[in-house]
Image (cartoon, rainbow, N blue to C red):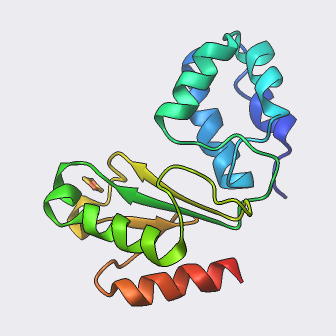
Amino acid sequence: MSQTLEQIISTHAGKPDELLMVAEQLMDRYRAIPTSALPLMQQQLGLTATEIQSVLSFYHYPVTDVPIKCHVEVCRALSCHLKSADAVLRHLCDALDAIPDQVTKDGRLLIARVDCLSDCERAPAVHINGEHVAATDLDALVKRIQAALA
Ligand code: FES
């Protein structure tokens, strides 16, 4: 059974250095940071809104209550940059009418530029909803994202 928002956050109560872990768990569970999580994170972790917001924006974690159906992460770190990650990002954004690091107007898709996904040997690394996908055939990649949005 998956944990509730309150359970995820309270597990890290009093541990402000675990903010990133909380954010990752919320992203795994909700594919976004629900707005109701912010005051709980402040209260339980003992951090200010600004401290939380700066970490969430650095990692391009969206704060929204609209359920994102598809969260695409394109690594921009060195190994992936050298293997044309920028071209992958451009192709996906053009094909899907998206802007990097912004949730689409319908609230269903986020294509985020992220730092190393620990998948360097498969550069350029792309993850869709937390799972690695090959970025060798870009049209197939677009179709996969469209299928995730359907
Ligand atoms: S540099 Fe891209 S996954 Fe590590």
Give the left or right position of residue 79, taking residue 73 as reference: left
Quarter of the image for residue 120 reads bottom left
**Percent from the top left, x then y, of residue 135?**
33, 77
Residue at x-position 27% and y-position 61%: 86
**Percent from the top left, x then y, of residue 33?**
71, 41
Give above or below for 13 relative to 85: above
Q: Quadrant of the N terminus?
A: bottom right
Q: Quadrant of the C terminus?
A: bottom right
Residue at x-position 64% and y-position 44%: 62
Which sits in the foreground, 27 or 96?
96
Residue at x-position 79% and y-position 41%: 34
On the question of residue 131 being in view, the answer is yes
Q: Quadrant of ligand 1?
A: bottom left
Give the left or right position of residue 141, taking residue 19 as reference: left
Give above or below for 56 relative to 128: above
On the question of residue 15 being in view, the answer is no
Residue at x-position 80% and y-position 32%: 37
Which sits in the foreground, 36 or 16?
36
